[in-house]
Structures are given as C-alpha cells and as structure tokens.
Amino acid sequence: MKTTRSIYALGISAMFLGGFLLLVVFGATTYRNISAVQSSNNELRSSLSYLSTSLTTDRASDLFINKENVGTVLIIADGDTGYGKRIYLYEGYLVEDYGPVDGSLMPEDAIRIAEGQTFTIRKEDQLLIIETDEGTVKVFLQDREVKFS
C-alpha cells in the first residue's frame, strides 16, 4: 500500500513537471514570435519615423524638393548656412548626406537610413506626403516653404 502511494505521488509530480515544461516551451515560443513581429514592424516603420522627425524638429528650415539623376531629393536646409540634410534613394537604400543645398550629391559618403526602392514626395495644401516602401507619412508644414525644382 505504501508503494502504491509513492508511485501515485511520483506520477502526480511527473505530470505537474511535464505540464510546467510544456508551459515554459509554449511561452518561450510565443514570446519569440511576438518579439520577431515587433522587431520587424519597428524596422519597417523606422524610415517613416526618421523622415517625420527630420521634418518636424526644425521649423526654421526651408525645404527643397529637387529632381536629380538619382531621383527625388528632399533637402532640409540648415538655416541660412547654405547647407542642409539631403535625403534620397541610392543603390537600393534611402540615404542621407549633408552638403551644400545647391551642390552635387555625395552618395558614397551618405548614411544608409533603410532599404528601399520607393521615395516619392508631393504637397497637398499644408501637408507634405512622403511615400516609401514602408508606407506613407504625412507631415503638417505649418509656416514652412517648400521649393520644388
């Protein structure tokens, strides 16, 4: 009778231990999947967030949208210095360099922002609408002037 109780107690303990291990494995797998989806979403939205932040942090700057040999170039002038941040597509990447507003681009020195094949900009009333592979961002321009060339 004592042996039967010991086997019964051991069986119950093994069942709880097995259930606990299954719960840990299931929880770890679920966490890994959720984390991967979140990381993927953050990577997809990073270029849109970067563009939006770049356009809203400096209200005194003029914005220029130029057509260059690489395509559309968004230039955020650095006050009256004649220099600015230039954002454009180059060899499958959205890149940024810093240089003269009306100077030639320096893609070999540019910093990669994100992978992409799409970078279009249009203005509707006071909204600047930027489209990339990740989606669309709309930025309210307040009193800023946008110069197209």
Image: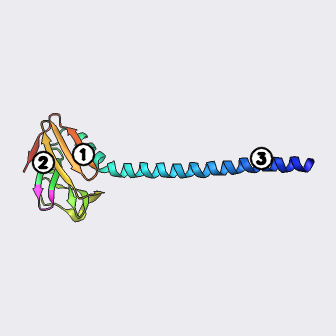
Give me the C-alpha separation between circle 3 and circle 1. Answer: 57 Å
Nearer-N-terminus badge (2/3): 3
Residue 13 image point, x, y percent:
77, 48
User: Which residue was labeled with disc 3?
Assistant: 12
Region of the chain picked out in magenta, as a range? 67-71
Residue nearest the observer in this picture, 99 or 33: 33
Give me the C-alpha separation between circle 1 and circle 2. Answer: 19 Å
Main SS type for the magenta part? Answer: strand
Q: Is residue 105 above or below residue 26?
A: below
Residue nearest the observer in this picture, 90 or 143: 90
Residue at x-position 14% and y-position 34%: 143
Residue 70 image point, x, y percent:
15, 61
Give me the C-alpha separation between circle 2 and circle 3. Answer: 73 Å
Nearer-N-terminus badge (1/2): 2
Nearer-N-terminus badge (3/1): 3
Answer whether residue 29 is visible to the viewer in this image: yes
| Quarter of the rendering containing residue 146 | top left
User: Which residue was labeled with disc 1?
Assistant: 136
- Count all numbered tags in the image, as a single digit: 3
Answer whether residue 85 is visible to the viewer in this image: no
User: Which residue was labeled with disc 2?
Assistant: 64
**Amino acid type for the residue under numbered disc 3:** Ile
Residue 131 image point, x, y percent:
21, 49
Q: Secondary structure at mark 3?
A: helix
Residue at x-position 21% and y-position 58%: 89
Residue 27 image point, x, y percent:
57, 48
